[in-house]
Amino acid sequence: MYTIEKLRDIIQTELNKKEYAEHPISLFEPLKYILEDGGKRLRPVLVMMAYNLYSDDIEKALQSAVGIEIFHNYTLLHDDVMDDAELRRGRQTVHKKWNTNVAILSGDAAAITAYKYIGKVEDIYLRRVIDFFNNVAMDVCKGQQYDMEFETRDDVSEDEYLHMIYQKTSVLIAGAIRHGALIAGAPEEEYDELYDFGGHLGLAFQLQDDYLDVYGDVEEFGKKIGGDILCNKKTYLLIKALELANQEDKALLNEWLGKKRFDPAAKIREVTQIYDRIGIKEVVMAKIEDYLEKSRKTLEKIDVAVERKQHFFTMLDYINGRKK
Amino acid sequence: MYTIEKLRDIIQTELNKKEYAEHPISLFEPLKYILEDGGKRLRPVLVMMAYNLYSDDIEKALQSAVGIEIFHNYTLLHDDVMDDAELRRGRQTVHKKWNTNVAILSGDAAAITAYKYIGKVEDIYLRRVIDFFNNVAMDVCKGQQYDMEFETRDDVSEDEYLHMIYQKTSVLIAGAIRHGALIAGAPEEEYDELYDFGGHLGLAFQLQDDYLDVYGDVEEFGKKIGGDILCNKKTYLLIKALELANQEDKALLNEWLGKKRFDPAAKIREVTQIYDRIGIKEVVMAKIEDYLEKSRKTLEKIDVAVERKQHFFTMLDYINGRKK
């Protein structure tokens, strides 16, 4: 059994070799750049963890795990262009450091690189791997499409929001886990269950991100508190607040959303106070716990020795603990 | 045996069904739009023609042929953004009609759609199809990268130019032919030879495009003559002219290249006269004939009944005739 840290090391060592970089090197510089910025390597770690549920011969999962990480980074390259983001993990985004054309084309090359690596599996799994990954990749696109469409709408429902973050974020997390189990030779019903497990885990992750933006510890969270509030981002917290607020609070919230000029600290403080009055903190916490509980129940059903599942259980506990 | 026209009809009928369009429909509107604008359907026709060399059961090649056409159109969506093109076949480009984000994301969705369709082959061919197509797709990206890099260079050699257009254009044409033969069960040495055949065919096509921009019949060519000259596009004609011109003509050519303000008709006329003095017309024609001859020689070696190859031979004659 491999610990999460050990798996992350193995993946990082493999990424450091930069074997994915072909000629002309200029086409792959942006991919190297974005992959150098660290990150948790969550998705490839999940591929390897899921593989490790069934087999210790984890080297066999390494190349396609790297492919999943490259795919994730390709989506970041293009998303940053579409969102016109300046920074990612404290560094200039690719389209700011180079330009938009570079981000588009090196992103396209990264997507193809991802397909190359994800296909590095035994032939008996290839059909299922490719068909499934195509669906995952398409869901990620669809999630991004909904995310962009929601920016200009002020009537996004809770269900629509959850569906959007499910496609944009959870499907790749769930897909990484299912993929790892599949190429380890898990039975179909088990890798499908692990997909459910990962889907709920991904939703918990994303809601936790929304939560931590308002209620996180700035040192532990690693980024500024209240960023979502300042830019009126349609998070789960905001959507539920608009749904649950009494008329007075709703009017106040809409007033803050409509203000073009404001003191940032005041906006964060006031909106957080509205959230507190409505009890949004407890609403989100309950939703996260609900998803984690669903994940836990599914994980319990997976028919491998309980020690094998320990790192996944620890991960669920960690997420649950982090938000308190 | 199916004629080229019949194959084009079959492909067009399949595209008209728009089965590739998923929800949200907004994500697929740009792909529908660009696929509606006609075009010769050259690449899917080539898939079907190559398949038809070995088998009449062409329905089996239809879905992956459609995938190749979708892939081609995905590259057009992104290339038009990178080139900031206004028009494509007389219609507004997607990023002008909608916006850049729409062109990027719907292009990404189109790329995934292409992978879905190209993978619709018998399982015994899947590994070879996917591995090969990944290489083709990457070459197309690399060709686009070189094309963009060449824009800011004034020392692009003939070899560099030919390598660039080979990757950007020929590889997908060659790849379509190889793909059709592969999934029809052709022996490896034959689909590899057909790849060579297609590579030279693609180069002839691209050089013919360069040629027709200067020496084409405006009615037959369907676009304005001299467009490449006006924007100083580094075509085969310009590269060879700069290489072969005497000092006087070279100075004159560079003067026209450097002019910020000029009468368009005068620039086209004068540059064409320089080309004529150098004998560029004959240089390009000889190069095209050389490539077509290479294609012909390779096609002759393919071990199928000569009637089966007739449409390919006709295609070579057609290209050869068109430029005269």
Image: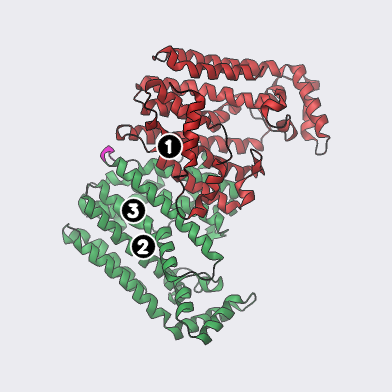
Chain colours: A red, B green
Which of A130 and B214 lies nearest the eye of the viewer?
Answer: A130
Residue under disc 2 on the same chain as residue under disc 3: yes
Q: Which mark is residue B176?
A: 3
Residue matched to label 1: A134
Residue matched to label 2: B202
Res A234 quadrant in image? top right
Query: x and y percent of residue B237 in the render?
Result: 45, 74
- Label 2 Cα crowd, 10 Å radius (few <14 / some 14-19 / many 20+): many
Query: x and y percent of residue B300 in the render?
Result: 20, 64
Query: x and y percent of residue B292 in the render?
Result: 30, 69
* Chain under numbered label 1: A
For the point 51% across and 39% down, the residue is: B25
Q: Mark 1 is on which residue type?
A: Asn
Cα separation, mark 2 vs mark 3, equals: 11 Å
The segment highlighted magenta reads B120-124
Q: Which mark is residue B266?
A: none
From the viewer's perspective, tell me whether residue B251 is left or right of residue B240.
right
Report the predominant secondary structure element of the magenta stretch.
loop
